[in-house]
Amino acid sequence: MRALILLQIAGAILTVSGLFGLGFCILRGFRIRRAGLSPEEARSQLQKLIAVNLGSMALATFGLILLFVGLSF
């Protein structure tokens, strides 16, 4: 029983962390677009941001899986 509660807490923490990461990516993307950079430089910075975005999505997804498993049993 205690392990399931720990799974729920860990899942919630990972999910919220992933959502914060997604919010960071959105804000950073808007800043890059408003910066008035050349298209090549903007594309370069946005491509670097893709790795953070994918990592945030994976973190949030893994957290939701842990949360679902913790709540299912």
Image (spheres, rainbow, N blue to C red):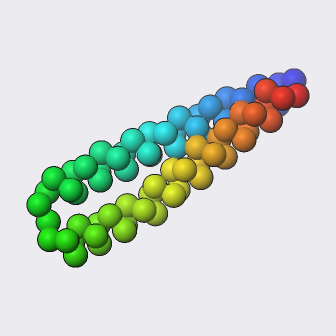
- Place residue 65 in its image quadrant: top right
Residue 29: % across, % down? 29, 53
Residue that extends furthest to the left in the rendered view of this protein: 36
Side of 48 relative to 14 (left or right): left
Any part of residue 33 in sight: yes
Residue at point 88% right, 28% down?
73
Left or right: 10 as drawn, with respect to 38: right
Q: Is residue 56 left or right of residue 28?
A: right
Position of the N terminus by quadrant: top right
How many marks the image carries: the answer is 0
| Residue 24, image x, y percentages | 36, 45
Residue 49 is situated, as x and y percent measured from the top left of the image, at: 37, 61
Question: Residue drawn 44% across and 45% down?
Answer: 22
Question: Residue at position x 63%, y 46% from top?
Answer: 61
Task: Please indicate whether residue 37 sits to the left or right of residue 59 in the image.
Answer: left
Towards the viewer: 13 or 71: 71
Residue occupying the far front of the picture: 39
Give the residue drawn at x 84%, y 29%.
72
Q: Is residue 6 above or below residue 50?
A: above
**Does any portion of residue 7 appear in the rendered image?**
no
